[in-house]
Image (cartoon, rainbow, N blue to C red):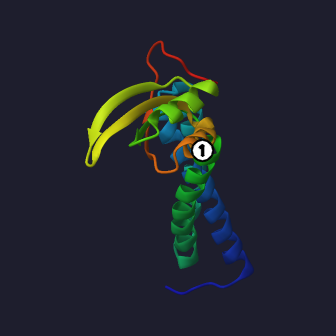
Amino acid sequence: MHFDFSAQAFLIMLGIFALRVCDMSLDTIRVLFVVRGRKKLAWMLGFMQSLIFVVAISTVLSNLKNPLSVIGYAGGFATGNVVGMFIEERLAIGHIHLTIVSPSRGAAVAEILRKNGYAVTEVSGRGMTGTVTLLHVDVVRRKLDEVETLILEADHEAFVTAEDVRPIRRGFWRA
């Protein structure tokens, strides 16, 4: 096996790389839509992804004598995963459930969130060092930064966790 450093070999490698970046970016986003139950979008992305994959893999298989093709394929795969994650973060599709633990300012956090239109459920609890207030807030993901800023304004020591959720029925969701 020898490396072909011709302009054509590099163009083929770059083409394969670009196809794989597109393919894997679509795949990453598609999987997230599947998990969130978005059937039509998952189907469309899966269709496009498989078309791109077939073109990419057939190009690699027809250029197996040049290892640059395989390098382009592997590099595009790895890069596409990261690009897909970046795109998904920017789209911020879906809903999240925040749990806020505040040892002393729970009421203030709840008040500022409610004043800004968010529904908050307060629960008293006992933490490692004593009484705490647990706050539960469900928000659309694109509002996470706004909510986090509000929480930190009221209590910069609050412990906050987030988990993806899928709304089933009823409740209050600030758009």
Q: Residue sitting at 59 percent across and 47 percent down?
A: 89
Query: Which residue appears farthest toward the right when viewing the image?
Result: 7
Instruction: Pinpoint residue 175: horizontal percent, then vertical percent.
Output: 64, 24
Q: Please tell me how crowded label 1 is: few (under 14), some (14-19), or many (20+) other residues with Cα within 10 Å.
A: few
Secondary structure found at label 1: helix
- Whether residue 55 appears in this view of the structure is no
Instruction: Pinpoint residue 23: horizontal percent, then vertical percent.
Output: 58, 51
- Whether residue 157 appears in this view of the structure is yes
Between 136 and 29, the residue placed more toward the observer is: 136
Instruction: Pinpoint residue 122: horizontal percent, then vertical percent.
Output: 41, 26
* Callout 1 amino acid: Glu
Query: Which residue appears farthest toward the top when viewing the image?
Result: 170
Q: Residue sitting at 62 percent across and 65 percent down?
A: 17
Between 110 and 98, the residue placed more toward the observer is: 110
Q: Residue sitting at 38 percent across and 35 percent down?
A: 133
Q: Is residue 124 left or right of residue 172?
A: left
Instruction: Pinpoint residue 166: horizontal percent, then vertical percent.
Output: 45, 27
Q: Residue sitting at 56 percent across and 46 percent down?
A: 152
Q: Residue 51's quadrant in the figure?
A: top right
Q: Residue 163's quadrant in the figure?
A: top left
User: Relative to 128, is 144 above or below?
Assistant: above
Between 164 and 34, the residue placed more toward the observer is: 164
Between 79 and 118, the residue placed more toward the observer is: 118
User: Relative to 22, is 93 above or below?
Assistant: above
Residue carrying label 1:
153
